[in-house]
Image: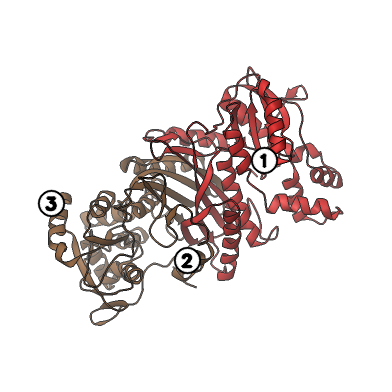
Chain colours: A brown, B red
Amino acid sequence: MTEDDVISAIATLCQDRLRRVTLGIGDDAALWQASRSHRSAISTDMQVEGVHFTREMMPLQDVGWRAMAAALSDLAAMGARPVLATVALAFPRETQREELLEVYRGLSECGRRFKTAIAGGDLSVAPSLVLSITVVGEVRPSDAKTRAGARPGDVVAITGRLGAARAGLELARQSLALDEEHAAAALRAFRRPEPRLAEGRFFAASKNVTAMMDCSDGLATDLARLADAAVCAATLESVPLHDAARRVAALLGEDPEKFALAGGEEYELMVAVKPRAFAHLSARYAKRFKRPLLRVGTFGKGSGVTWNGAPLERSGWDHFTT
Amino acid sequence: MTEDDVISAIATLCQDRLRRVTLGIGDDAALWQASRSHRSAISTDMQVEGVHFTREMMPLQDVGWRAMAAALSDLAAMGARPVLATVALAFPRETQREELLEVYRGLSECGRRFKTAIAGGDLSVAPSLVLSITVVGEVRPSDAKTRAGARPGDVVAITGRLGAARAGLELARQSLALDEEHAAAALRAFRRPEPRLAEGRFFAASKNVTAMMDCSDGLATDLARLADAAVCAATLESVPLHDAARRVAALLGEDPEKFALAGGEEYELMVAVKPRAFAHLSARYAKRFKRPLLRVGTFGKGSGVTWNGAPLERSGWDHFTT
């Protein structure tokens, strides 16, 4: 059983009551019509100790930050502006009060940074630490960007170089002879990722952006999902690697591109852009965000993802098998 | 550390970013202003295997129903009409696809029954089954009922007899010589509770209802919470016991009132009503719902809960200690 297969079976089970829900299971966030002029967006993200993190890898405050950032990234991918979050936190019986509050300090710090109120939630004991964060945001109906809109010919681009979070994970697991600057960048990417909310709203406002999602399960898996949603094929042309990923992979004797293709747990946005508009949009993006918009490929007719002339496997993060 | 203490510390940590959130941490649901004329309500409820249920106690479909019902009950307590839910489901690695879908069948059945779309969520492996359900609903700003509005003199009433869910828990744990009719009622109360959504909207529409919450952690704890929120004292005058609770307690040689005072995991609503309006409101309620509104006590000046002339301990369900 794979994640995508089960989600599709669940979507079939749950499709019958949609009322004012205008976008349901299967995209980064769901949308509903909160009033005549407004759409609200909602998304839920879960982080489990021993699956998404261990306490040895990062302080509890970072566990909180990271969970909130992961949830907010799904609103970014919809072009929505966050309003609030609810937090369900399950924790082992021996957890101390101060440890719980450390998690909330991280959650709250990330919430404050991205203007998201923590408005409620639930607490329970459990065998391990589990955080389930639900975020709600708003988006103008005409701005919401789903995964499904790409067309053959569209350019695929991402908002930042990939692989740093995976490099940070390796650094948190073992001691490596890496220079301070790259080590700090990798650990920051792993422990304190930043959801691309401003970038998401920038893309949402452009009619030339045809599809958007966050690239949180590795480029190979997520590009395949974007292609599938659009009923298109995708050709991967280049894999923009973070310097820290290149260096850590070299120290471990691993293929650095795997860090980007199968790394996951990082939150750059991936967009499909009409080909004639790409040069202008990427220039505006670079001016606004002081970073380049990185072209990684193109969509075409057909299905599947091609890389270096061969089919690319979905080698990314699967929560059921990792 | 107690649940109420930690929630209060968390509320302090998270109070700084409220923007359009008009009611934050500490009530049954949070409220935000979705548009000029509308309030949305949101609540999150978590159910953990081994804490809130075991697989021996009920089929997986009932695990799903019960989790959705528990979450919807918090919208009922706010007087809100449900719109959608998101579901985060963590499950042990050895879980079968069909088992996951059984949980979703129960979630979806309960969602359909109460007009709630399952719009999204997340899936992950974990050491045990954890369900975190977030529900979103709508309520007219003037209708929303918080916990805080009761005044000295107000009557306290509940929507149904208590203790059946606890009786069902005992029946699920052990074989007891109980007649079929009461056994079925107790097991239904435990496995297939019904959120009082129509009742919640009925109370929400009445200006004479000053406060409302769901009575899901046992009457002793929840009445104390309602009194604390109103800065009032409460006198408990009677404990309306379900027949099945009376019979199961007798078979076990236990005090049946404990089933109601400390049982929890059932979802009747508790309301505070202006004293002069109670007779009229309860007559209207009985006509509409074909069941009586049960008077259980009154609010007065001071603090704490009195029962039979003595202070009543908060003997209810605490997720940190049970």
Q: Is residue B246 left or right of residue A208?
A: right
The residue pinned by badge 3 equals A287
SS type, badge 1: loop
**Where residue A250 appears, x then y in whole percent?**
24, 69
Element type at mark 3: helix
In the rendered structure, find residue B268 and report the number of the disc placed on it.
1
To which quarter of the image does residue B285 belong? top right
Task: State if disc 3 and disc 2 touch (CB < 8 Å).
Answer: no
Q: Is residue B160 visible?
A: yes
Residue A139, horizontal then vertical, whole percent: 33, 48
Secondary structure beneath dot 2 equals: helix
What percent of the width, then of the height, locates residue A141? 33, 51
**Alpha carbons under labels 2 and 1: distance apart:** 33 Å
Q: Residue furthest bottom?
A: A310
Residue B1 in view: no
- How far apart in space, not on screen, are marks 3 and 1 (Cα)? 57 Å
Please state which amino acid type lies under the numbered disc 1: Glu
Q: Share a chain, discs 2 and 1? A: no
Left or right, B296 with reference to A198: right
Judging depth in this view, the residue of B146 and A253 nearest the camera is B146
Tell me where residue A52 sits by quadrant.
Answer: bottom left
Which amino acid, by three-letter code, is at mark 2? Ile
Q: Residue at x 74, y 36 (%)?
A: B292
Tell me the residue that label 2 is attached to.
Answer: A7
